[in-house]
Image (cartoon, grey):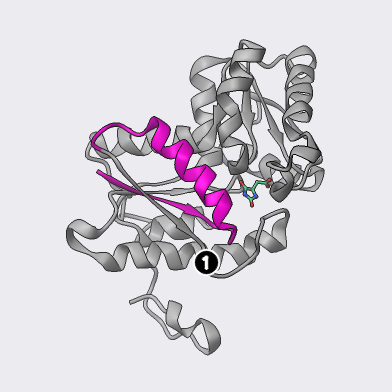
Amino acid sequence: LRIKVINPNTTATMTETIAAAARAVASPGTEIVAATSASGPVSIEGHYDEAVAAIGLIEQIRAGEAAGGDARPDAYVIACFGDPGLLAARELATGPVIGIAEAAMRAATFVATGFSVVTTLARTRVIAEHLVVAYGMERICRRVRAIDVAVLALDDPAGNARARLFEECRRALAEDGSGAIVLGCAGMAELAASLARDLNVPVIDGVAAAVKMAEALVGMGLKTSKHGDLAAPLRKTYVGSLAHLAPE
Ligand code: 5HY
């Protein structure tokens, strides 16, 4: 079973963190192929970053599908908490496409009656809030919080992201009526286990959740439905610098 895990931002070191988190939970028979978007924002921290990042994400999905035969991934993970390009990717992909935000939120619903999301910059909270509504989680997601650390500063020791994350999780558990925490950034993946230990509650990293969700769906023989609105994109002309993205 091959899962292509795509970091839609263009920071390779972040892809390494993501790939390590994916491989840490992958079953023995699962191959994790990690990819970094070839063009676009170095980090995704708002609607504009996300819109542009979707192009690089889609190019990675197209490359996977073009591999064809056995080389084609059995499933894809979009390793960015905004789940950029998720439905577009599902139109293109044969196998399941899982966004880390959706996977983490749905995993939380199995282990708690309420969860809080803790993400990076305050301005990206609204992106997670839109997903909460899109995924029908308004009642069970109690709050979306932010630690106000930039995505690329998460692994900067001077930024003390881990301490701020611990503090915000503690406040979430004390104030939100939440029983679990969803980490709102792919770059937080490596912190989930130690935070869970220190807080003694489920702390869910979307990369791990998405990999296991993908394994489960492929294991059930499920592929993305091509009946209805996730059917392949309509063939038409695309002009200009994006002409190469025209649906085949
Ligand atoms: C992510 N941004 O997971 C999101 C999360 C965030 O570049 N990778 C990014 O902080 O909005």
Q: Range of the magenta residues?
A: 1-29
Give the vertical position of 222 relative to 168 (above or below): below
**Residue 162 highlighted magenta (yes or no):** no
Q: Amino acid at mark 1?
A: Gly
Residue plotted at (55% across, 23% down): 193
Residue indicated by mark 1: 56
Task: Point out the residue furthest to the left here.
Answer: 69
Give the vertical position of 61 relative to 166 (above or below): below
For label 1, the SS is: helix
Residue plotted at (75% across, 17% down): 170
Q: Position of residue 232 (x, y in %)?
A: 35, 65
Q: Is residue 243 left or right of residue 168?
A: left
Q: Is residue 211 left or right of residue 29?
A: right
**Can you tell which quarter of the image residue 197 is in?**
top right
Residue plotted at (36% across, 55% down): 228
Q: Residues within 10 Å of mark 1 (few under 14, many from 20)?
A: many
Task: Point out the residue furthest to the bottom here.
Answer: 240
Number of marks drawn: 1
